[in-house]
Amino acid sequence: MPDLDFMWANAKMVAPSALLAAAAALILPLLYLAATAALNRISPARCVRDPLFRRSLKRMCAAALLAALTALSCLVFAGCKKAIPGSTAIAGEISVADVNLSRALAKPNMVCYLFLKDRWDIPIAVKRWVNPQFPLFFRLTPSDLLVPTRPWKGPYALEAAIFSPKERERELPPPATALRTQTQAAVFPGDQRLSIEIGLPTEPVTSESQLMIK
């Protein structure tokens, strides 16, 4: 999947340069005509009738047309962000801060949940992985919403939870011993370079949680 955000940013940067190139390519033939007429001391109309001048003029006009089309295509592409499938996706990766912790979490039957929450801390989309391999790449789109008719606007928050369930039938809500990390900054549709790092809790852990990651 191409990085659409990077492509849009480049399109926005290329468009002004292409417009300037098109303008320059349109002005240059006029300057060329005026300079040729002045140097040869002939009228511009006579210059236009010259075959060599016409050939040069056609080449300059073709360059101007190409630059104008490039600028137009860049502007159209940069302005159609919402119309491109996946452009409003929320994507990124979940990683583990410590190598030893990563090894501990590699034991069988571990599950990783990713919750997309609204401003009231209510999950509106959920992703689940069994025996996850880190870094774990994720992608959320409007099709992942628990309520399909819900607006896809934001601001949102992302929370990752990793644990070993005692009962497969009752994994949610995650137990108190789960390792959890939530994004601090607000998340909006279109954010596609997010990073969530799982680490050990800063407060003293219970013996149960210590056993979980050993």
Image: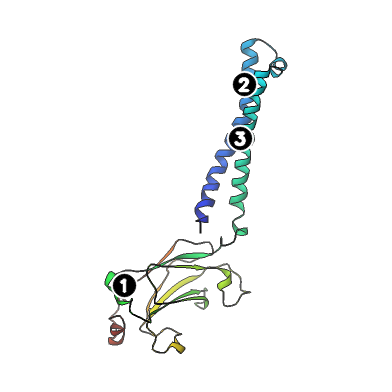
Instruction: Classify 10 Å Cα crowding around label 1: few (below 14), some (14-19), many (20 and above).
Output: some
Q: Residue 148: percent from the left, percent from the top?
A: 61, 75
User: At 60% across and 37% down in the image, what residue appears?
Assistant: 67
Mark 3 is on which residue type? Ala
Quadrant assignment, res 107:
bottom left
Quadrant assignment, res 40:
top right
Specify the quadrant that holds the C terminus: bottom left
Which of the pair 145/2 is nearer the observer? 2
Marks 3/2: CA distance? 16 Å
Marks 2/1: CA distance? 68 Å
Marks 1/3: CA distance? 55 Å
Residue 74 vertical placement versus 165 (above, below): above
Say what secondary structure mark 2 lies in.
helix
Residue 179 vertical placement versus 27 (above, below): below
Q: How many labels does the image show?
A: 3
Which of the pair 158/105 is nearer the observer? 105
Q: Residue 114: percent from the left, percent from the top?
A: 45, 74
Say what secondary structure mark 1 lies in.
helix
User: At 62% across and 21% down in the image, what residue appears?
Assistant: 32
Q: Residue 155: percent from the left, percent from the top?
A: 52, 68
Please give the residue where the numbered disc 2 appears in the rendered image.
Answer: 32
